[in-house]
Image (cartoon, grey):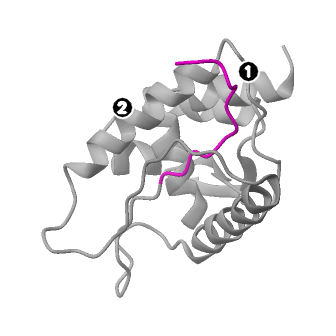
Amino acid sequence: MSLEVSSLRALAHPVRLRMLSLLTGVAMSAADLARELGVSQANASYHLRALAAARLVTAAGEVRVRGGVAKRYRYEVDGQAPPAADVASEPLFAQALAAELVRRSRLRRTGASGISTDAELWVDPAAWDEVRKQMTVASKQLHRAARPPRTAGTVRLSVTVAAFEMTDDAP
């Protein structure tokens, strides 16, 4: 299995998507992730190993914990390129994104600012290329600005971007 397919499959799980988001702001261990996500440490460790095997997170040192050593991991936004589309895995990834968006929408703060868009469009290739570049820049900017969960003076955001070319085949 190629790295791209492995990466896409690793992301096709809601817990792993949440982990990747958390690991953008700070390096964390499986125990840290388990506490933040409300899952068992064994479950967090399992999902963290899947992300590491797919090379979506990198080792970011170790920390001593009660006589033991815990590995910490981090998502580097400027690291590996996003996985390429895989016909078999793409629907699983889309389902995971949709489920995560539904979960997050339940947490939307009343009256909070935000933007939403949904469209199926035909545009000039140059316009598509420019907008795709802008979305990439904005996504990386937000990832670089990420801080550890509940850091004073920060706001919690939900950001989901899925923009891709489609076939001309009817529906």
- For the residue pair 129 and 47, the one nearer the viewer reads as 129
Question: Percent position (x, y) of residue 70?
Answer: 60, 47
Q: Which residues are magenta?
A: 160-171
Which amino acid does the dot numbered 1 rest on? Answer: Asp
The mark total stands at: 2
Q: Is residue 114 visible?
A: yes
Q: Secondary structure at mark 2?
A: loop
Residue 37 vs 159, above or below: the answer is above
Q: Are marks 2 and 1 in contact (CB under 8 Å)?
A: no
Q: Where does the N terminus fall, quadrant-wise? A: top right
- For the residue pair 62 and 111, the one nearer the viewer reads as 111
Question: Percent position (x, y) of residue 165?
Answer: 70, 38
* Residue positioned 13% across, 68% down in the render: 110
Q: Is residue 26 visible?
A: no
Which is nearer the N-term, disc 2 or disc 1? Answer: 2
Residue 144's quadrant in the figure?
bottom right
Which amino acid does the dot numbered 2 rest on? Answer: Ser
Magenta: main secondary structure: loop
Front: mark 2 or 1: 1
Residue tagged 2: 40
Residue 77's quadrant in the figure?
bottom right
Q: Is residue 127 magenta?
A: no
In the rendering, which numbered label is found on residue 17? Answer: none
Q: Is residue 170 magenta?
A: yes
Residue tagged 1: 86
Q: Secondary structure at mark 1?
A: loop
Question: Percent position (x, y) of residue 166?
Answer: 67, 31
Residue 87 vs 166, above or below: the answer is above
Q: Name, please, the residue furthest toward the right.
A: 2
- For the residue pair 24 and 141, the one nearer the viewer reads as 141
